[in-house]
Every structure is written in C-alpha cells, then in structure tokens.
C-alpha cells in the first residue's frame, strides 16, 4: 500500500513538470491529482508551492472528502473540486486543473471549442464543452465538472470565466488531455481569427474517435 | 543590518530571473526593487546590465530619494519612480517594472484590463487600471503610479504608452503581480479577439478577492 | 547495409528533437521518417513514445508497405501515409508530419498560404497548397499528399482539417521544410490580422526560387 | 591586428546566440556581422551552418566588397548587403538581419511601425520605416537599407516582403536594435488588434530619444 502511494506521489510530482513544459501554468497556479487505486484516497499538489520546489514528498495525501491524511502543507485550494470528481466518477483516476491561456480565453467568453481538427476528433470526440460559472468554497465547481462531463466524450471542460479541468483513467491521461485541450483551443482560435473553420462531418468525428479510443490501442478514457 | 541587506540583495537578484523565466523582459529592460525594512533604503537593479550578469553584489543600495548608498553601477533609470512609491506608500515593500507584451499593448491603447477571470478577481480584485502618460526624468511616473493605485485593489497599473508597474508587501509579491498581470492581460486580450468576455458580477469579484486576500492564507497585499 | 540503417536510425531520432525545439509538436504527436537509400525500407518514429524517450534503437524499420521489419514498438499511426509517399515519389528521401499551430490553422480553414515573403519564395516557390480531407486507415492521406505535391514546387502540403506533411531529398530537408512552413504560416497569418500582404510578382518568385534551389548551392528538393 | 579579429570573431559568434535566445531566427536564417575597426574588413556568419555549430573559428572574414579573406565556408548569402552598408555608412560598426515574425509581418504589408511606446521613442526615436522590395544578387538590398536609414533616427528598417536589417555603432548595438525591433513590432501589433494606439506627441518622442541617446549614457547609435 505505502509503495503504491510512494509511486503515485512521484508520478503526480513529475506530471506537474509537464504543465510547466507545455506552458499551461504560471507561478503556482494549476494542479494535478491522482486517485489511489482501490482506496478512498487521492494525491494532490500542495497549495502555493512553486513548481521548482515540488517533490514527491511534498505531495499531499487526502481522503475523498478533501481532508489531509498525510502532508506538511495545505493541499491545493482546488482539492474539493478534485475530490468531488473522484466521488462521483468511479472510472476517473486523474484530474488536472489549469488556467492555460487559449482554453481560458474560450472559457471567458463562455464558448465551446468546436471539433474541427482530426486530432480533436481523436482525443475529444466532440466540442470541448463549457461548464457553469461556479465560486470556489463549496461543491459548485466539482458538481459543474461532473454534470458537464458525464455522458460527454470530451475529457476536458472549460469552466466559465475560470479555466480548464480534465479527467482521465489515470493522472497521465488527464495531463495529456490538458495539453491537447490547450493545443486545439489555440489552433482553432488562430484559425477563426481569419475566417471560419471547415466543419468535419459528425460521422467522420465518430469514426475517428472510435478508432483512436478503441482500435489504436490507447486505453479508453475514464468516462 | 548588513545581513538583512545581503539577504535582500540576493532576493532581488534572484527575482529578476523570474522576469526572464516568464518572458516579461527583453535585453536589459525591466527591474525589481525591495525596501530594506525599517530603513529609508531600497535595493534595485543596476542600469544596463544584462540579466545573465546580475548578481547579489551588483544590486544597488539607494536611499529613498534614489541616491546611491552602495554600488558600483548606476541604479536603474526607473529608480526615481520606485523611490517615489516607497516614500508615498509605507506598506509597499517591493516594486516591479516591465514592458511585458500584452500588458503594454493595453497600455498603448490606454485601456484598462476588465476583471473577467476568477484568477483576476483573486489577485487584482478589480480591473487593472491605466495610469497617466508621464515622461521619465522627474516624479511624474512615481506620482502617476501612486495616484492610480492608492485606494485601488489592483497591485498593478498600466502606465499609458509605457508599461507596467506592480507593488507588493515584498518584492516577491510584486513579481507575482507582474507575472499575473501579463498572464491575465494575455488571456483577456485573446478572449476579446473573438468576442466579448462574459462579465463577472461585482459581488462575485468582491467575494473571490476577499477570500483570496484574507481567508486563503496569503499575506494581504500592501495597499 | 546495417551501418547505413544505424546511421539513419540516429538521424531520424535526432531530427525529432528539432520538432520539439521549434515547438511544432506536443505530447507524442508528429513524426519523421527517412528512406533507406537503394532499399525498399524506411525508418520511422514508434507510436505513442514521448520525445524524451526516443532513441536510435527505438526507431522502427519498415518496408514500403508499412510492415515492421525491425522494432519493438508499433510504428507511427501515420506510417501508411509515409510509405505511400515513398512508393509514389522515388526522389523523396524524407517525410515529416506535424500539427504545428499556424499551419494547422490554415488547414482548418482549408486555405493555402499565399507566397508573400522572399523566404517563402526561396523555400516553397509558390503558395503552400491545401490537400483533401482524408481519414486515417487506408491510402487516402498518402494519396492526398502525393496528388497535391506532384508537380508542385512546395515541399509542404496542408492536409485539410488535419495538419502538415512535408517532403525532402532527405529527412533533414523535410524537417527544414516543416520548420519553415510553420514559420511562414505564422508570419503571413500575423500579417493578415491587420491587413493584406503586398503581393510578390510571379517573375520575382520564380527568380528567387530558381536561385535558391539551383545557384545557392542547396541540394534541389526531391520533386 | 589578429588579436582584434579573434575578439570580433568571438563577439559575432556569441551574438548569434542572442538571436536564438530571443526567438528571432529559425533554422539557419538570420546573420550578424561586425566591422573590423580601422580596416576594410568585416566578420560575418557562414552560410547554411546551424546556430548550434557556430564557433568563433567558423566565422568568415571578408573585405568590404564581400570577398572572403579567411574562412572555410561561404559567407552568408546576405554578405553583399552587409558590405554595402559598411561602405556607405562609416559610423556603422555592426549589422544584423533577421526574419523575426512580427517585424516581418509589418514588412509583408509594407507598413511602418508607428512610434507609440516610450521604449520605442527611446531606442528608435521615430517610426520603424519600410525599405523597398529588393531582390538578392546585387546591391539592391544594401542600397535600400542605406537609402532608408540615412538621416533617420531608427537603427532598424523593414525591407518590404522580406524582413529586418538593423545597424549600430557595434554588433552588440545592432543586435539590441533587432531584439527591440521585434519586441515593439509585437507589442504594437497586439495593441492594434483591438483598437488604435494613443499617439505620443512628437515633442515627447524627441525629448525621450534625446535623453536616451545622449543623457542616459548610452553610446549614440551610428547614424
């Protein structure tokens, strides 16, 4: 058990560096968490610690109500939202939150990113939807994420006026979704600056998504 | 006393690297200063020295009229503006100046950045305001900063046709404000390229800002 | 023979780092391949392996029908498209595929990049053309690339709603074309945000392209 | 004499890394040269060598007609333009050429960058002007640079449909001008995406430029 937790601490710590590498975060914003398989536990970033100083040991172990089980710092201020997702979506093993620039710009307009790239059909299988405006401090954000993503192919939601939450079968899949979300939000934004994108037929989106999620050998996303 | 100054020299030198890391400066533009607590002294960047060559020893110790007390180079050409802020705002412990791209683009239009992101409500609590056009060489810039930020929640001001000044309880808080200012100026700019942002209700801005500054455990900004 | 293949494995592995350096790829997207000269063989990126983990030994040796001859992983999911190009275009020694942002934005609108920069006349000699929308899984993508680039001066094609494929006399030339394609797609995009580019006369485009491809001492592109 | 040339070889080689650091160049595009003081000689980048492989020894020593005096590679294909500038403008000690993105976008529209930032008044003292469309291969480019910059405060010219040339009292000043040119071209572009910049009064531009070039202690630019 403790070996598993050590492994997850290391994975979650390392995955935060991917947020830095892809320019999805500034200062101490953004966070990654992972469920401890088979336990009512999760590992999440400490609050207000810089990305340079994150280590496996500084990650916080919480229960799925967001209470600290083990850790010297406070957990991320977004812990309640992560915890809500794990409680409500048993197939989710990882959650990521960022304020990445282009995705947050769509979120600030309250506008979904239309599915107009084959890579977006592969990974998201649909538009990237918008979730409600929700204040931090209770279950509003978590409920908004779950309500929006339940039954949706997309592993990413744009929370209105806020930023992005992504889910995955594990934390790495959720980080991948966060990276791809910003990438396609940026490309579609730039496309639309000079005109409208060519639509992709729904049948082609379905075909691409099915192939990528089932035939291509990727593990299916946790939805 | 001299230990405190050594510590501040190191902090100010190191914090300049954050301006580089977040792409807020090119060549030798931009500067960070810190007040020496309890003394009428400040530590500031030398003028015209490249970011690669900055060391704690090369930082300049000045009095709060901008006169050099200790240092081999001339202090930043913006020293008078920093000094004016420290004289006028006793709660300010750090000042940062940059020409960061997106914030300066808003400044070149003389337009405030509207508060349309929850992260902006957290950190700025309001729009990021515009200060007057002011020429270098006397107290005009310093006075413009102080007049604009006094009584304002925002720790950042966009000086018209010029760039950004930020303040904080210490130099690190002022650097954080400079990083966040460019981040939100960029996201709101990109949002507005394709339409208008959804407004956030004033009561929600107030709630978010109060929580972030008082409940979240951050030290309150120096205003 | 095996020495040649070892050399090509190293070249192809190293060239992938250029895609990272120039920001043309995120996560595991994008791929480079090279023909083994004089053989019906090619070396290509493995599928789903991160750029940090690519090594010469992890590259996949395939025949020109895309079947694996040597390699522990599956080859890139774009292998069929690369193989089709090598079968149809004997002068091509390297193929590159990316979803680079600005080029993919033009592709999402189905719009060619007009030849309005001297550097673009040098390298591309014409507009960068748009190829058809094509689904992965059969020869559609490969055929679209070949049909569009045959008889065209440009070594790059924007596959509609998808991304970029480039060709070259060797893999390095194809990577150069991918780098230059994104560079000019970005510059022309930014130009057009604020107005129309000044056209370059066809005779000047012809003159610049002829000089660059024949006089300047560069090896002619493989078309 | 040979010690001076060794020093300049090293300076020119090192300064090319600043072009990379500030993202002004891709692949092998862009070049820096320096006059050998008191001699009819210049040191310039070799043609087609990657930035990673540039060393002091690989720099090319040419006379001011562009003939190679010492060096194993061919000199930059822009050597004739650099040489023309040194022959025509005796105060110029350094020349830089780039296709940096935002400046080249203005060049592609044939539009000067208006002087609407105090940092631009400092460094450029005026708009950044547009030079003629000119083909490579004779003195057209060099003459276009000299005709445009003679009697102009700006050390940078946007050559139509091409890119940027900058001059300075030495190579470092010319590199600084290239870095600042892209920086202000980007900021003014982004400003104008959402509205018109506030003009700066001519008297204020004159005041700022005079102070920066004469009072601030910078060496005056070579014009």
Image: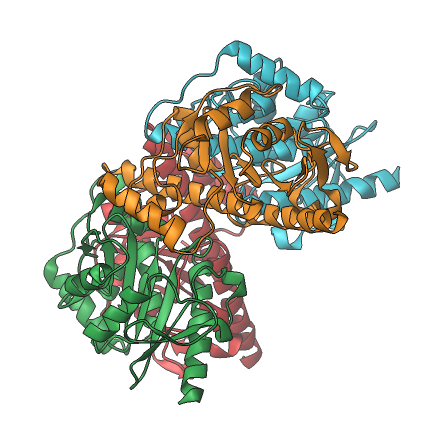
Chain colours: A orange, B cyan, C green, D red
The one nearer the camera, C19 or D47, is: C19
Residue B127 lies, with reference to residue C37, above or below; the image says: above
Residue C20 at x, y percent in the picture: 46, 59
Q: Quadrant of the N terminus of chain C?
A: bottom left
Q: Residue at horizontal 43%, vertical 23%?
A: B111
Residue A25 falls in which quadrant of the image?
top right
Q: Residue furthest top?
A: B203
With C52 as the anchor, is B215 left or right in this view?
A: right
Where's the C terminus of chain C, which quadrant? bottom left
Q: Is residue A167 left or right of residue D31?
A: right
Q: Is residue A97 visible?
A: yes
Q: Quadrant of residue A42?
A: top right
Residue B160, given in percent of the width and then of the height, sits at: 47, 26
Q: Is residue D90 above or below residue B33?
A: below
Circle count: 0
Which residue is located at x 83 percent, y 27 percent?
Answer: B38
Q: Is residue B86 left or right of residue C94?
A: right
C80 on left or right of A65: left
> Vertical placement of A52 versus D87: above or below?
above
Is C75 rendered above or below residue D218?
Answer: below
Q: Position of residue A56 (x, y in %)?
A: 72, 48
Looking at this view, name the residue that lies furthest to the bottom.
C1
Q: Tell me if I can see residue D71 in this picture.
A: no
Q: Position of residue B216 (x, y in %)?
A: 69, 23
User: In the image as oriented, which residue stretches furthest toward the front?
Assistant: A38
């Amino acid at each position: 058990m403790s070996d598993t937790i050590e492994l997850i601490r290391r994975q979650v710590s390392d995955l935060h560096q991917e947020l830095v590498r892809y320019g999805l975060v500034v200062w101490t914003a953004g966070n990654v968490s992972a469920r401890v398989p088979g336990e009512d536990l999760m590992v999440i970033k400490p609050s207000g610690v810089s990305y340079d100083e994150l280590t496996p040991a500084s990650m916080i172990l919480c229960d799925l109500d967001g209470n600290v089980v083990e850790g010297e710092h406070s957990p991320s201020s977004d812990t309640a939202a992560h915890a809500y997702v794990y409680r409500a979506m048993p197939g989710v093993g990882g959650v990521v939150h960022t304020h990445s620039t282009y995705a947050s710009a769509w979120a600030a307009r309250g506008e979904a990113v239309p599915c107009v790239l084959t890579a977006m059909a592969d990974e998201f299988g649909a538009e990237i939807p918008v979730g409600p405006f929700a204040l931090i401090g209770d279950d509003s954000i978590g409920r908004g994420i779950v309500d929006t993503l339940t039954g949706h192919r997309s592993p990413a939601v744009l929370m209105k006026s806020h930023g992005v939450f992504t889910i995955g079968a594990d934390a790495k899949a959720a980080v991948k979704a966060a990276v791809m979300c910003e990438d396609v939000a940026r490309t579609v934004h730039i496309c639309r600056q000079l005109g409208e994108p060519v639509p992709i037929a729904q049948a082609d989106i379905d075909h691409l998504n099915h192939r990528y999620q089932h035939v291509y050998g990727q593990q299916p996303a946790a939805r």
